[in-house]
Image: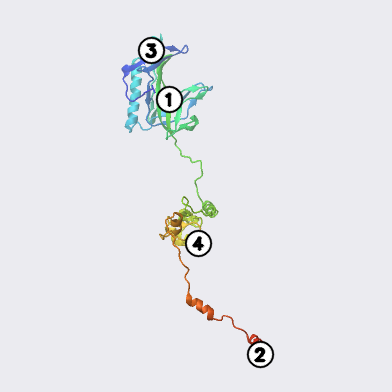
Amino acid sequence: MNDIVLSEFDFNDISFSRPDHISKKITLFNVKYKSKKFIIQTPKLITHAPLFNTNNCSGSMKFSIYNSTFCPISKKFLKNIESIDKFIKSKASYFWEKCNRSKNNRKFVPSIYTKPNINPSFYCNIQMYRYQPTISIFDHNKNPQPFNYLIPYSKAYSLIMLESVWVKSGKIGLNWTVLQMKVYLPIYKINECLIRDEEDIENDIINANNLHNDIINANDNNPNHIIIKDHPKYKRFFDMKRFGIPEIVIITKMKNENLNSDYLSQPNYKIIINTTQIITSSPNFLGQISNKSCILRKTEPVINKDKDKDKDTEHPYKASLEEILMIKSKLKKRLL
């Protein structure tokens, strides 16, 4: 980057080009500082609506120094502009001679306009390209913005360039041009609706209830447990708590649905996803088997001998009286 923003400058390093007669009445002398552009930064100033001529070939913008009476930075900036004016005014004879103009009735037009009880102000030219203003506009976060981002009475830091000294008829003055602006808008606008009402809370609860209740298949990389606040059965109650619904109301609703309301104060407990039991620290025998860390031994079935004896002697079936008489009659016939 060849351009330099000057914080301090020496008038002896300012040079002027040969006169450029752009019309019969107007002559320009381009300004250089050590063979580069003369660019300085303004303090935070109030901007006004830009002005354009009828065919949009040129434009200008007014800046107001709203705190020059008490802000040291603004005071210094105002003093620098006035000192530059004073320097150019001291060189007026040189410019008149180069323009072959009479030195009589000449008048210097200061850069700063001052009136009693009104903030000092000055005008900067706006560069135009294809009938469009050409200024680098940035928001307060230094994000590039279009020219229409700028609105009247914004505050802005700006880079301005002392482009040339102009001579017109019996007057002489300076051409300042605005190059960049970092803008602080006088209003703050949110384009997205962030307001939440009862309907939004109800919709969030409904969406929580509609969560798909998939059961995670247990394997080494995907255990079948989650923390309680993410469990499909409990998540909506934690959402209700987050939305500001009274805790007593949430607890009552949980009890009505036969859910453990103690979990409401323990959102990070781990829970089996398809049950409502907290995972304990008991040994995971199935996991040991799958990892081959559990040794299985052969065992003999336990036989209850007393129970077997009871099976041989007990008579669980009881015959009726008719069946007993029938059997008795059959036995008599056989004996006969």
Mark 1 Cα shell of 10 Å, populated few (<14), some (14-19), many (≥20): many
Residue found at x 42% / y 28%: 63
Q: Secondary structure at mark 4?
A: helix
User: Is 26 positioned to the left or the right of 214 in the image?
Assistant: left
Residues 151 and 228: in front is: 228
Identify the mark at residue 335; answer none if there is no mark. 2
Residue found at x 48% / y 23%: 59
Q: Nearer the viewer, mark 3 or mark 1?
A: 1
Q: Nearer the viewer, mark 3 or mark 4?
A: 4
Mark 3 is on which residue type? Phe
Circle 1 is placed at which residue position? 178
Whether residue 144 appears in this view of the structure is: yes
Q: Position of residue 302 (x, y in %)?
A: 47, 70
Circle 3 is placed at which residue position? 95
Position of the C terminus, as image quadrant, is bottom right
Mark 2 is on which residue type? Leu
Q: Earlier in the sequence, mark 3 or mark 4?
A: 3
Q: Nearer the viewer, mark 1 or mark 4?
A: 4
Mark 3 Cα shell of 10 Å, populated few (<14), some (14-19), many (≥20): many
Q: CA distance from mark 1 to mark 4?
A: 65 Å
Q: Position of residue 46 (x, y in %)?
A: 41, 32
Mark 4 Cα shell of 10 Å, populated few (<14), some (14-19), many (≥20): some
Mark 4 is on which residue type? Lys
Q: CA distance from mark 2 to mark 3?
A: 162 Å
Circle 4 is placed at which residue position? 253
Q: Secondary structure at mark 1?
A: strand
Q: Earlier in the sequence, mark 4 or mark 2?
A: 4
Q: CA distance from mark 4 to mark 2?
A: 81 Å
